[in-house]
Amino acid sequence: MIVFSNHALRHSGGIERYLLTLVDGLHRRGVRPTVVARRFDATLPEYGWVEPARIRTWGLGGALRDRWFDWRLRRLQRQRGWHPLIALNQTGAADIAVCGGTHPGYLAAIGKTASWRDRLAIALERRHLENAAVVIAHSGLMASQVRAFYGIPAAKIEVLYPPVDTRRFHPVTAEQRLAQRRQLGLPTDRAVFLLASTGHARKGLDLLVQALGHSELPVLLVVAGRPVEVQAPNLRYLGYRTDMEDVYRAVDCTVMASRYEPFGLVGVESVLCGTPLIGAEGMGCMEVLGTEAALPFRIDQAGSLDAALAQALARWQQGTLAVADPLAALRYNPSVDAHLDRLLDWVARLAPTPR
């Protein structure tokens, strides 16, 4: 029995994309997992590939909602024998705790003092990590934060970078890239930089608008995700997209100026489509991107982002910006099957001795 828990099965942030990718990979193996969540998008094909178990949260918000979900999940786990449970959300029911971010790490990155809501979230995250038999950290950054903030022993943590569907995210011909660019109405006489974001403050939209939005250089910043509230001559909003593979192929470079990024699937997805990344040092995905694929910069160093953008613009003008061999530019195997094999190995190891 394969059982996942998460707050939702839908298109949204990185952890939701991760769950959809796992469900798709299991479907190709003929496996129908149980997914416990509070929200399901029944229009998705993945919804038909799982056994949905909904936990209603009755309109509760924030930390109270998460604690109610945790309480109901632990009760259902005992009643239905859901062992081992792979938890993508913070819950004391986790046997395999997936760590796609830490709350203290986020607070430290944005310079925020913990409120009572934050302290409730941190307490639940502690149970999530301490109660589990193993913690699957999505980056070395996450592994170090799990040790530093929660004292989880290194022997209990495995770094397992998240997978990407390489059947979907892959390069196409130059003619196909140009056709997609035209379909999105993007200019060919300007270097187009993409920000894919559902949280603009954390993703550094303000920094990118400052660097690109009013530039006299031949550049354009396009945003895919949540609507933007700012305007600038070199800024264009593409809307919320579910065809991100085509967006990556249509632009010249993806840029991530995240103040906190536990991994950042966007970076790997972009590179697999042949589009390089300008990324802030310290983001999880920078651990796995080679020099051809990523142009790093320091978010806390004046002029560093401008220098990386200038380097990308120079390569665009020379026609050398695209990533020639995406798989060779990655320092890990991004395939869904490789990730699932390791995850299911933990399921097999824990199944005979449920908590």
Image (cartoon, rainbow, N blue to C red):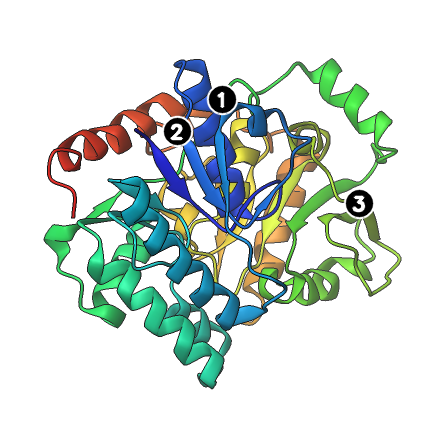
Q: Inspect the image, locate mark 1, and give the three-letter code of the amino acid beneath it.
A: Thr
**Residue at label 1?**
166
**Residue at label 2?**
334
- Percent x, y for residue 168? 57, 21
Q: Which sits earlier in the primary sequence, circle 3 or circle 2?
A: 3
Q: Which sits earlier in the primary sequence, circle 1 or circle 3?
A: 1
Q: Pointers 2 and 1 in contact (CB under 8 A)? A: yes
User: Element type at marker 1?
Assistant: loop
Q: Inspect the image, locate mark 2, and give the three-letter code of the amino acid beneath it.
A: Pro
Left or right of 180, for residue 336: left
- Percent x, y for residue 294? 49, 42
Q: Nearer the viewer, residue 136 or 229?
A: 136
Which residue sits at x=74%, y=62%? 209
**Residue at label 3?**
239
- Indicate the quadrant where residue 41 lies: top right
Q: Inspect the image, locate mark 3, and give the three-letter code of the amino acid beneath it.
A: Gly
Q: Nearer the viewer, residue 289 or 34?
A: 34
Residue 266 versus residue 105 in the image, above or below: above
Q: Which sits earlier in the primary sequence, circle 2 or circle 1?
A: 1
Left or right of 8, for residue 79: left
Residue 228 versus residue 79 in the image, above or below: below
- Percent x, y for residue 193? 70, 45
Left or right of 189, for residue 59: left
Residue 233 versus residue 47 in the image, above or below: below
Q: CA distance from mark 3 to mark 2?
A: 27 Å
Q: Residues within 10 Å of mark 3 (few under 14, many from 20)?
A: few
Q: CA distance from mark 2 to mark 1?
A: 8 Å
- Percent x, y for residue 200? 66, 61
Q: Is residue 324 visible?
A: yes
- Indicate the quadrant where residue 332 lies: top left
